Amino acid sequence: MSKVCSASTLTIISSRQFYLCALFDVTLISGQVLHFTSGEVPLNGVTVWAPGGNRGPFNYQTGMTIVISSLSQKSGTEASSMKVAFIPQVDSPNYPILFGGYEIWQAADLGLLAGATVTMSKFYALPPSQTGGQILTAQGAMGFFEGTIQGVEADRFFVDITVEDALSLLGDQQMPRAVFGVGCFHQVYDPGCDPAGTLLASKTVSGTITGVTDNAHITTNLTQVDHYFELGGIQMTSGAANGLRAGISSYLHASGAMILAVPFATTPAVGDTFTAYPGCDRQQATCTNTFGNLVHFAGVPYQPDPSTIVDGGTENPPLQNPGRQAGQINGSQTSSRQPYYNVNAPYKY
């Protein structure tokens, strides 16, 4: 990740006398965004300079002791990584800081941190002794590292996370991509599944919440068949939870009951509106019945089950003549003439 910063930041760095702290932007897969500073005072109105464009301004709060234990960045195709510990300060005025509605220890145990995007920036400012005790923020911060959380370890006092940049995804790619299998190897709505890029919009519907049990259990006015939205997603479009997103793990038409894979950080209310779309289990029936997209199905559902090599798919395989090559595999038949060897004859040298 290349580094950019404002001219004011370069001037401060070149003076060799500055206040330095790290800033963290954490975006959970639910859509909740949290901003923390490793410094001792909150920083408001900080713009993050990055090669892809500036972001912010953001307000960075205290309440976490943040320790970066390792950070590696290399040129080329080798992935960069960062390990950082988040330690809640129980005596802070901002305590407790909630991740998806839970304290960070609980959020880690529930898997709410997995896959979250983390941006670490370096903030340089003139020493407070030169600015009347204030920390000025107009110069902004230097975007330094960005990646997703790939590992989480938690105990009673702190949570350790491992963040890896986008290059780490290359190591998870199966090569070659097109591998024969019963299920489709496309991701739903990706360019292979939907070359025109119109499928998601055509399958997204609007709905209204008719009942709320808690942040993860709601009922809706949707009328699609049972399981239609499972593996799909929901995004709130009004109310206190407006803008929050979550995956859908269960949906039943009869009751309109919906269970979310990740609880909303804020509890929605009856009458709040949302949009929802179906997911895909990569099976031919789903591709046909739910999406009408069989032309782009990339699975091979009619290939023989590997277990039939053993018995030909029967419980009583036919007997084989001793010595036949095909007789080494129960249930198979010789497909051509094979040399015959008398297994009872003595060896000849």
Image: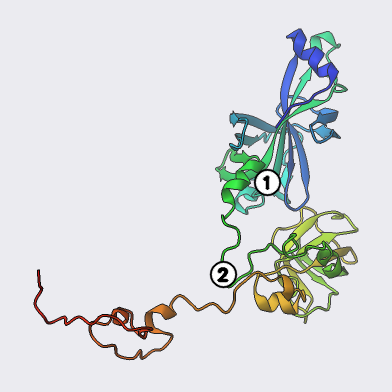
The amino acid marked with disc number 2 is Gly
Q: Secondary structure at mark 1?
A: strand
The quarter of the image holding the N terminus is top right
Judging depth in this view, the residue of 29 and 314 nearest the camera is: 314
Compared with 149, 299 (above or below) is: below
Look at 58% across and 50% down and name the residue there: 172
Report the disc number at residue 181.
2
Compared with 84, 9 (above or below) is: above
Look at 70% across and 40% down and name the residue there: 118
Which residue in the protein does label 1 denote?
103
Which image quadrant is residue 244 in? bottom right
Indicate the position of residue 279 as horizontal and vertical percent values: 73, 67
Indicate the position of residue 267 as horizontal and vertical percent values: 80, 58
* Measured Cα–Cα span from mark 1 to mark 2: 41 Å
Question: Going from the N terminus, do you reach mark 1 or mark 2 first?
Answer: 1
Which image quadrant is residue 243 in? bottom right
Indicate the position of residue 329 as horizontal and vertical percent values: 33, 79
Q: Is residue 335 left or right of residue 287?
A: left
Look at 85% across and 11% down and name the residue there: 131
Total marks shown come to 2
Q: Is residue 264 left or right of residue 182?
A: right
The quarter of the image holding the C terminus is bottom left
Report the disc number at residue 173.
none
Pointer 1 local density, CA inside 10 Å: few below 14, some 14–19, many at least 20 = some
Indicate the position of residue 253 as horizontal and vertical percent values: 77, 79
The amino acid marked with disc number 1 is Glu
Q: Secondary structure at mark 2?
A: loop
Judging depth in this view, the residue of 62 and 144 nearest the camera is: 144
